[in-house]
Image: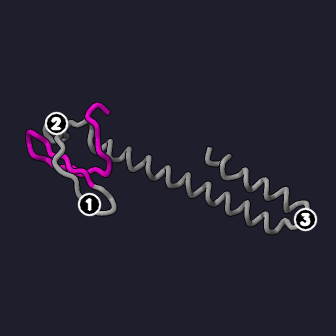
Amino acid sequence: MYFTALTFPGIVLYYNQKEKGDTKTMKDIIKAIIIIVLLIAFLLTVGVLSYLGSKSIYNHGICEKCGGHYEFAECGGGKIKVYIYKCDTCGYVIQTTTLMNPED
């Protein structure tokens, strides 16, 4: 979807410039569009990996030390939110960057 949305204007500009005979500028535009698409793909990948890492740490709300259940303790952080969960049995604390749902 992003690829289609970002490349359509480039294709239109390419054909407009092709009639004028200036393809060097169009190559630069196409390179810029490709870089933007790759940047968006990279950011989406980082977001997904961050979520999966938090999900792995959370372990469906079950404490890895004693088998108890994590309870939401607090939220902190500045630009990046940090969610802190504490085991109700042994007190073990974990931090995630995603607000977790015990059903996940």
* Stretch in magenta: 82-104
- Graded by Cα atoms within 10 Å as few (under 14), some (14 to 19) or many (20 or more), the crowding at tag 1 reads few
Up-down: is 24 above or below 53? Answer: below
Q: Which residue is mark 1?
A: 77
Q: Which residue is mark 2?
A: 69
In this image, 3 relative to 104: left or right?
right
Relative to the observer, which residue lies in front, 85 or 1?
1
Residue 69 is drawn in which quadrant? Answer: top left
Q: Nearer the viewer, mark 2 or mark 1?
A: 1
In this image, 29 relative to 58: left or right?
right
Q: Marks 1 and 2: in contact by CB < 8 Å?
A: no
Question: Looking at the figure, which quarter contains the N terminus?
Answer: top right
* Residue at image coords 81%, 58%: 14
* Residue at image coords 84%, 65%: 23
Q: Marks 2 and 3: in contact by CB < 8 Å?
A: no
Q: Amino acid at mark 2?
A: His
* Residue at image coords 85%, 62%: 17
Spatial separation of the CA atoms under disc 3 and disc 2: 68 Å
Up-down: is 50 above or below 25? Answer: above
84 drawn magenta = yes
Spatial separation of the CA atoms under disc 2 and disc 1: 23 Å
- Graded by Cα atoms within 10 Å as few (under 14), some (14 to 19) or many (20 or more), the crowding at tag 3 reads few
Whichever of callouts 3 and 2 sits on the residue coming sooner in the sequence is 3
Secondary structure at badge 1 equals: loop
Whichever of callouts 1 and 3 sits on the residue coming sooner in the sequence is 3
Q: Which residue is mark 3?
A: 20
Question: Looking at the figure, which quarter contains the C terminus?
Answer: top left
Q: Amino acid at mark 3?
A: Lys
Q: Position of residue 26 (x, y in %)?
A: 79, 63
Q: Amino acid at mark 1?
A: Gly
In this image, 6 relative to 71: left or right?
right
